Amino acid sequence: MNHQPPDITELQALPLAELMRQALATKLARRGTSFSLCSIINAKSGRCSEDCYFCAQSAHYQTEAPVYPLLDKAQILAAAHEAKKNGASRFSLVTSGRGLASEDLGQVLGIIRAIRKEVGLKVCASLGILGESELGQLKEAGLSRYHHNLETSREFFPQVCTSHSFGDRVATIRAAQTVGLSVCSGGIFGLGESEADRLSMAMILVEYGIDSVPINILIPLAGTPCAGLPPLPITEILRSIALYRLILPQAAIRLAAGRESALGDFLSSAFMAGADGMMIGGYLTQRGRAPEADQQFAEDIKQLWSI
C-alpha cells in the first residue's frame, strides 16, 4: 500500500468518538460507499493436527465440532449457488488441517474450476500452510484470493498456538503473493492480547500490502483453552476497528465470526468506525444471522453512509 502510516501514538490518544469520526471519513474518502459480502463453506471439518487455542476443530480438544472429510463437488456447488443468491461476491473453501492433504488437492482444483464455470463467483480458499507449488496450481485452476490469517501479533502468537509458528503463517502469505494471488489476512480480537498486539498485527498487514482484512471477535467455544476468556469490551472493539481503518485506509475490512455476539446492538457502530464488509451465512462451526437480515443491514448502512 502506498501511503504513509499515521502516527499511531497520536491516534491512540484520541477519544473514541473522534477516532470513529476520522475512521469513517477515511473509509468514505478512500473506498466510497462500497460494502462487500462474502461467504464460506466448511468444506472439511475437524481432526486438525494444530493446537490453535481458539479453534473447536483442533483434535487436541474435546468439542462438539463436526468431523467429516472433504465434501463432494455437488454439495459445494450447491452452497456456492446459495451464496450467490444471498448477495455474496466471493465464495471461499475452508478446510481443517495444517495444510491441504495431497489426496484432496486434485478434488479442490476441480471444484474451483466448476465454481468459476457454473456459478461465476470469485473463488477464495483457506487451506492451511501451503507452498508455491500448490498455490500456483490453485491459481491456475481459477482461485483469485488465498485466505490465511495471522490471528494476532508476532509477539503474542506463541500464547495461542504452539504447533506452528507465526513465521509459518507469514511464509504462506508470501508464497501466495509470489504466485500472483491476492491475500486476505487478519485475525481474532479478544484472545487475551493487548491493543499493542492488535496494532502490531495491523502494521504487518501494512508491510505485506494486504488489501482484504477479516476481523473476527473471539467466540469462547466450550472445550477450547479460550473457553473461559472474558469478552472484549465493545468500546475496545470499536477502537480497534477504527484504528485498523486509519492504518489500512485502502483495505476492505470485513467483520466475520463473533460480530453478532460481541457487538449486539452496537453492530452498526462498527461500520460507522470504518468496517465495510461482512461474512454472511455462518462461520465454520458457528451459525450467523439469516442472510436476508445481513443483506438488509448492508443496504441500511450504505444509506447511512450516503446521508
Image: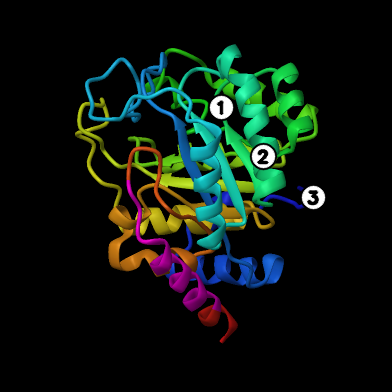
**181 on left or right of 13:** right
Q: Secondary structure at mark 1?
A: loop
Q: Is residue 146 above or below residue 292?
A: above
In front of the other: 259 or 141: 141
Hey, what amino acid is under mark 2? Ala
Disc 2 and disc 3 in contact, CB within 8 angstroms: no
Q: Which residue is mark 1?
A: 127
**234 on left or right of 28:** left
Instruction: Tally the marks.
Output: 3
Query: Can residue 172 be seen in this snapshot?
Result: yes
**Of the image marks 2 and 3, the number of the one nearer the N terminus:** 3
Residue 12's disc is: none
Q: Secondary structure at mark 3?
A: loop
Does the magenta run of residues contain 202? no
Q: Is residue 24 above or below residue 303?
A: above
Q: CA distance from mark 2 to mark 3?
A: 36 Å
Disc 3 and disc 1 in contact, CB within 8 angstroms: no
Q: Is residue 140 above or below residue 269?
A: above
Residue at (69% x, 17% y) in the render: 131
Q: Residues within 10 Å of mark 3 (few under 14, many from 20)?
A: few
Does the magenta run of residues contain 291? yes
Q: Residue 124 occupies which quadrant of the picture?
A: top right
Q: Residues within 10 Å of mark 2 (few under 14, many from 20)?
A: some
Q: Secondary structure at mark 2?
A: helix
Q: CA distance from mark 3 to mark 1?
A: 29 Å
Hey, what amino acid is under mark 3? Asn
Residue 114's disc is: 2
Q: Which residue is mark 3?
A: 2
